[in-house]
């Protein structure tokens, strides 16, 4: 039989935490932080809905915070209708740009120091093509408020992608090893990258001795999984369509809420119901009850381009030829060519380890001053004379002989 955990007190994430030394007070959020978090939650649920709607029906795992941070840095260079579209999609409401930046700064500081028993790390970086001029004001904002590392790189050098990916691997503790694919497009002039790493041990751990093989009934059929078991007093919630339990980490300042649709309820339909209002209502309904929790051990990786998702949320102008990022370069003819998102999560008896990386790739509509032809795939070649334009030889190379 699994050991019963003692009754726990449900804690607000931004209220009080208890440690062995006594009560620990965590500062309240400012009014602007509340607005940013509220807007980010609206954005996060909208993002999840769109990702699920555009997925193939398989596993999905995203980090709204990572996407928000990467786009928040990019927002500092947006102007006109592009700025308005990003503001709409990111749900910034009536916050000024200065208030948005300060709220990100304060929230990052708060989250990364919230629970001494949980590792919560947030890192940002801006990588600029060597020779491309960027307004100093844009750099200063992202260094000051996002603590962004700013580096100039020769994007034509094959090692440039390796440099950025090494930063990603370091900041995610090697859980995500790459986000930039070589060779880099000659029109790409900037990457804005956010990385988040989380590692928390359960406040009440699952005993490995209680983990047993059992059947998981998935859409593709039944499969055998390792099902963990925890019994005790936990915050629970139930409706006509789902059951939910809250599993805390560390000093209970972070937790995982597990939401299980009842038999016959489609999970995608449940996702479609999710929004910030219903989420707030659900959280308010949690009450401590004696519970038996069975949860499979799992580990998964997820990756996706978010261009279509973010366009559907209202920031399509940022991806178009008419995008206005003159706050980065006044004459740059810049647009967002790709927003890539990668995540990792592992859940076991000890706790949860998760990582996320979001890369915003900014490209130039104009022909770049640099040019790269990398003949590392089949190509044609022609030998001709410059005067008569006679074609002397023509060839197709698909398998170059080795030396």
Image: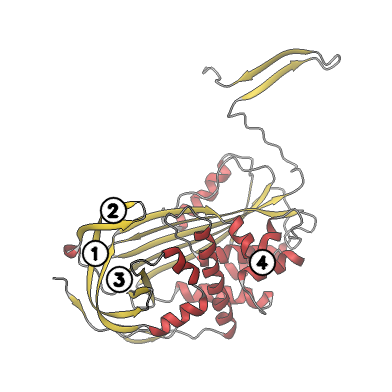
Sequence-first tag of 4 and 2: 4
Q: Earlier in the sequence, mark 3 or mark 4?
A: 4
**CA separation in Å, label 3 and label 4:** 37 Å
Q: Which residue does the numbered mark 1 point to in the structure image?
A: 228
Q: Which label's residue is closer to the chain start, 1 or 3?
A: 3
Determine the CA span between mark 3 and mark 2: 28 Å
Nearest to the eye among marks 4 and 2: give it: 2
Residue at (77% x, 53% y) in the render: 333
Q: Which residue is mark 4?
A: 86
Within 10 Å of the Cα at label 3, are there few (<14), some (14-19), or many (20+) other Cα atoms? many
Q: Which residue is mark 3?
A: 202
Between the residue at mark 1 and the residue at mark 4, the CA separation in whole angstroms equals 42 Å
Is label 1 in a helix, a strand or a loop? strand
Which is nearer the eye, 38 or 149? 38
Q: Residue 380 location, x and y as percent?
A: 66, 22
Whether residue 90 is situated above or below residue 23 in the rendered picture: above
Up the image or down, 217 lies above or below 271; here it is above
Q: Are marks 4 and 2 in contact (CB under 8 Å)?
A: no
Q: CA distance from mark 2 to mark 1?
A: 17 Å
Disc 1/disc 3 C-alpha distance (Å): 13 Å
Question: Residue 229, located in which quarter of the rendered image?
Answer: bottom left
Residue at x 46%, y 77% (from the top left corner): 279
Residue at x 35%, y 74% (from the top left corner)? 244
- Residue 244 located left or right of residue 163: left
Disc 2 crowd, CA 10 A, few/some/many (<14, 14-19, 20+): few
Q: Which mark is residue 222?
A: 2
Q: Could you tell me which secondary element the residue under label 4 belongs to?
A: helix
């Amino acid at each position: 039989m699994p050991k019963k955990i003692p009754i726990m007190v449900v804690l607000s994430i931004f209220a009080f935490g208890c440690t062995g030394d006594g009560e620990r007070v965590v500062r309240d959020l400012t009014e602007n932080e509340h607005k940013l978090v509220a807007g980010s939650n609206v954005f996060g649920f909208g993002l999840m809905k769109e990702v699920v709607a555009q997925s193939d029906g398989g596993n999905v795992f995203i980090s709204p915070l990572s996407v928000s941070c990467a786009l928040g840095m990019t927002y500092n260079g947006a102007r006109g209708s592009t700025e308005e579209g990003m503001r709409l999609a990111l749900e910034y409401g009536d916050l000024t740009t200065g208030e948005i930046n300060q709220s990100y700064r304060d929230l990052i500081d708060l989250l990364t120091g919230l629970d001494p028993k949980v590792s919560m790390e947030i890192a940002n970086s801006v990588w600029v093509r060597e020779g491309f001029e960027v307004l100093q004001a844009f750099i200063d904002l992202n260094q000051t408020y996002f603590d962004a590392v700013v580096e100039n790189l020769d994007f034509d050098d094959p090692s440039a992608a390796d440099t950025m990916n090494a930063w990603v691997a370091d900041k995610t503790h090697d859980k995500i090893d790459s986000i930039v694919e070589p060779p880099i497009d000659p029109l790409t002039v900037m990457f804005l990258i956010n990385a988040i790493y989380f590692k928390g041990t359960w406040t009440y751990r699952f005993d490995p001795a209680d983990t047993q093989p059992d059947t998981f009934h998935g859409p593709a059929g039944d499969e055998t999984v390792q099902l963990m078991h925890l019994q005790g007093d936990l915050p629970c919630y139930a409706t006509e369509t789902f059951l939910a339990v809250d599993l805390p980490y560390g000093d209970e300042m972070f937790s995982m809420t597990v939401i299980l649709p009842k038999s016959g309820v489609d999970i995608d339909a449940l996702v479609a119901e999710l929004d910030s209002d219903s989420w707030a209502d659900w959280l308010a309904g949690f009450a401590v009850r004696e519970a038996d929790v069975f949860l499979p051990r799992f580990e998964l990786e997820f990756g996706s381009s978010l261009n279509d998702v973010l366009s559907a949320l209202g920031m399509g102008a940022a991806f178009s030829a008419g995008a206005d990022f003159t706050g980065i370069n006044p004459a740059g003819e810049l647009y967002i060519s790709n927003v890539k998102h990668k995540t990792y999560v592992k859940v076991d008896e000890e706790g949860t380890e998760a990582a996320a990386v979001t890369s915003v790739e900014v490209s130039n509509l104009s022909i770049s001053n640099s040019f790269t032809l990398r003949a590392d795939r089949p190509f044609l070649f022609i030998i001709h004379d410059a005067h008569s334009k006679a074609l002397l030889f023509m060839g197709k190379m698909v398998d170059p002989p080795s030396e």
